[in-house]
Image (spheres, grey):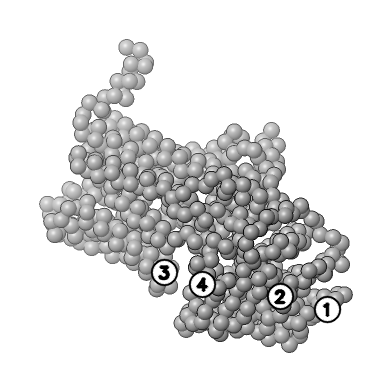
């Protein structure tokens, strides 16, 4: 799979014009994007494995969407890649090392439903946390860390919001702040758990655009999502997960009726808009829903 | 005598007694330590753990008393064992944290009551342990309290950013390579130590109030973590100091007096909270305000 050089404009721009753009700085990057490979990975609880025998490879620079119903193991897959969950069986490699050794090079956006937004912290405080892992125990942040944090905040377009308490941010601004935190780490792999969720359509566009720009700047990105249209319009690779790996490939390859049925166990309609497929409706799915925010996913 | 001299006389009178001096310093140190570490306890929603550990120390005291061990050490060991036990049980057994705390602390507390009530000579001290008695603090205990205060605050300062990150977002912190599990145990052990030194002054029943209330008050007034910690410490010291004066002049136990002042401060901070208070004080918001905050100002004018 190659990185598409000029990404097709996508569904949204065809439907509603160009999405709102934020200035994206060119970040000087010394390192190479990271690859990820899983071979025969099982993970979860003993009686009830959440990931069953997953084998897949993600190439450096890929922009990967992970889709599947609630409880299909999207978050678990991401946590296995981050080294937060040890697989019961199988091997995970980030670059050529186990994930635990690559933590400084992996940025992570957790599901924001798990964050307490009453916590007394400003945008600046949250983004600075992105530097903490690199610093080592007991070391205070220096000038370089502050510059990295400032650059990351500028990159996501929150410079005017530095001192705003996180509790007063809108949904999209919260996502941006946490993406900035991951960027402050200067990562070569970004792992995003539902980056585009619980936000309005305009914000979705803006976030999608931001992530595309980040992908173009040469970071491997793996992102779980329940928004299938976003998958269709921007990712260059899609992982269909339903505890097992149903399919992996370009959106055009995996957006087939049979693959979606096997992933979601329900009937989703595919419509083609130009050269890209899109999902126009999802009915009667017993396992979850494709619209609206997902909560409590594993 | 003018009003200033009168005030000075009132303020200085308790200090002429050596036991009052020891008691006052102990209360201030304990309140300071509780309030500082209490910020993490509140933000991690561990208030119930504070209560649980306090009751567990009571079991430790009983066993120490029975086996004629050093009471401070046996209480501390019981608290740390319970802290580690609570963490491990909830991690491994997949039962919820509050359930595992509920099981462990009621068991330890019941054991303590059974053992101590069996010994008739200990009844009076039992009451002291439950409600604390600052007047019986001796020099060794005061030194221990000071050492514990220094240790707890040193750890909180040295691992400031690690504790902050893992209190805010444990998964994110772990992903960034912060040793979250190790820090959890470290924090629980520090809470255990804090509670042990607080037993003498405020007692088993009220210690969790001292952990939680000043931090919760501070949280009403700020959106910055470091400010919250300093405010909580200030509230803790103020509660400790004024509580002991109330105790001296009104002849009530010091522990409950301290906790009552802290509770009063909490309601006052609710009232003056820029976030949700009835009386708005715009200066207390952090500057420079974002657009939402500016909107907030407009509403006030």
Q: Can the viewer see residue A75 in this picture?
A: no
Q: CA distance from mark 4 to mark 3?
A: 23 Å
Where does label 3 land, which residue? B91
Q: CA distance from mark 4 to mark 1?
A: 40 Å
Q: Nearer the viewer, residue A282 or A7?
A: A7
**Mark 1 chain:** A
Where does label 2 land, which residue? A237
Q: Nearer the viewer, mark 2 or mark 4?
A: 4
User: Which residue occupies the extreme front position in the image?
Assistant: A30
- Residue B51 vs residue B284: left or right? left
SS at mark 1 in the image? strand
Where does label 4 land, which residue? A98
Q: Nearer the viewer, mark 2 or mark 1?
A: 2
Where does label 1 land, which residue? A271
Query: Where residue A247 sits: x, y (%)?
Result: 68, 83
SS at mark 2 in the image? strand
Q: Are marks 3 and 1 in contact (CB under 8 Å)?
A: no
Query: Where residue B117 sits: x, y (%)?
Result: 17, 57
Q: Are marks 4 and 1 in contact (CB under 8 Å)?
A: no
**Mark 2 chain:** A
Residue under disc 2 on the same chain as residue under disc 4: yes
Q: Nearer the viewer, mark 4 or mark 3?
A: 4
């Amino acid at each position: 799979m190659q990185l598409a050089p000029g990404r097709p404009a996508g569904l949204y721009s065809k439907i509603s014009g160009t999405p709102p753009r934020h200035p994206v700085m060119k970040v000087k990057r010394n390192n190479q994007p990271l690859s990820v490979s899983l071979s025969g990975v099982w993970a979860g609880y003993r009686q009830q494995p959440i990931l069953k025998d997953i084998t897949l490879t993600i190439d450096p620079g890929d922009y990967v969407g992970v889709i599947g119903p609630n409880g299909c193991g999207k978050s678990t897959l991401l946590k296995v890649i981050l080294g937060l969950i040890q697989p019961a069986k199988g091997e995970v490699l980030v670059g050529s090392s186990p994930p635990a050794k690559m933590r400084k090079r992996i940025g992570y956006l957790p599901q924001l439903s798990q964050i307490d937004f009453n916590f007394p912290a400003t945008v600046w405080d949250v983004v600075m946390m992105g530097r903490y892992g690199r610093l080592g125990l007991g070391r205070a942040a220096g000038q370089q860390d502050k510059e990295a944090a400032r650059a990351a905040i500028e990159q996501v377009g929150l410079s005017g919001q530095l001192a705003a308490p996180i509790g007063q941010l809108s949904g999209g601004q919260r996502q941006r702040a946490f993406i900035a935190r991951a960027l402050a780490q200067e990562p070569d792999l970004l792992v995003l758990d539902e980056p585009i969720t619980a936000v309005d359509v305009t914000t979705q566009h803006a976030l999608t655009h931001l992530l595309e720009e980040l992908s173009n700047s040469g970071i491997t990105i793996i992102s779980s999502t329940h928004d299938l249209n976003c998958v269709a319009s921007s990712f260059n690779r899609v992982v269909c997960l339903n505890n097992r790996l149903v399919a992996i490939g370009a959106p055009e390859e995996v957006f087939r009726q049979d693959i979606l049925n096997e992933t979601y166990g329900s009937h989703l309609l595919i419509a083609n808009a130009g050269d890209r497929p899109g999902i126009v409706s999802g009915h009667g799915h017993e396992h979850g829903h494709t619209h609206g925010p997902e909560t409590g996913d594993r | 005598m003018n009003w200033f001299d009168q005030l000075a006389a009132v303020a200085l009178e308790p200090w002429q007694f050596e036991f009052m001096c020891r008691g006052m310093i102990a209360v201030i140190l304990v309140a300071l330590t509780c309030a500082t570490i209490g910020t993490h306890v509140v933000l991690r929603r561990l208030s119930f753990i504070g209560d649980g550990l306090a009751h567990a120390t009571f079991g430790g005291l009983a066993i120490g008393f029975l086996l004629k061990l050093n009471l401070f050490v046996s209480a501390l060991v019981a608290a740390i064992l319970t802290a580690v036990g609570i963490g491990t049980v909830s991690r491994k057994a997949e039962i919820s944290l509050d359930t595992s705390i509920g099981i462990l602390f009621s068991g330890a507390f019941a054991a303590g009551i059974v053992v101590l009530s069996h010994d008739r000579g200990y009844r009076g001290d039992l009451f002291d342990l439950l409600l604390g008695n600052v007047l019986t603090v001796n020099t060794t205990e005061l030194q221990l309290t000071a050492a514990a205060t220094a240790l707890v605050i040193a750890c909180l300062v040295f691992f400031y950013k690690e504790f902050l990150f893992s209190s805010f977002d444990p998964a994110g912190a772990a992903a960034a390579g912060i040793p979250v599990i190790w820090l959890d145990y470290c924090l629980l052990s520090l809470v255990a130590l804090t509670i042990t030194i607080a037993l003498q002054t405020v007692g088993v029943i009220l210690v969790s109030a001292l952990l939680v209330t000043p931090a919760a008050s501070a949280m009403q007034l700020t959106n910055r973590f470091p400010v919250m910690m300093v405010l909580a410490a200030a509230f803790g010291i103020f509660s400790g100091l004024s509580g002991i004066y109330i105790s001296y002049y009104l002849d009530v136990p010091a522990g409950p007096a301290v906790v009552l002042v802290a509770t009063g401060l909490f309601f006052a901070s609710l009232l003056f909270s820029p976030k949700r208070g009835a009386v708005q004080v715009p200066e207390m918001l952090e500057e420079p305000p974002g657009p939402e905050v500016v909107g907030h100002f407009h509403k006030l004018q």
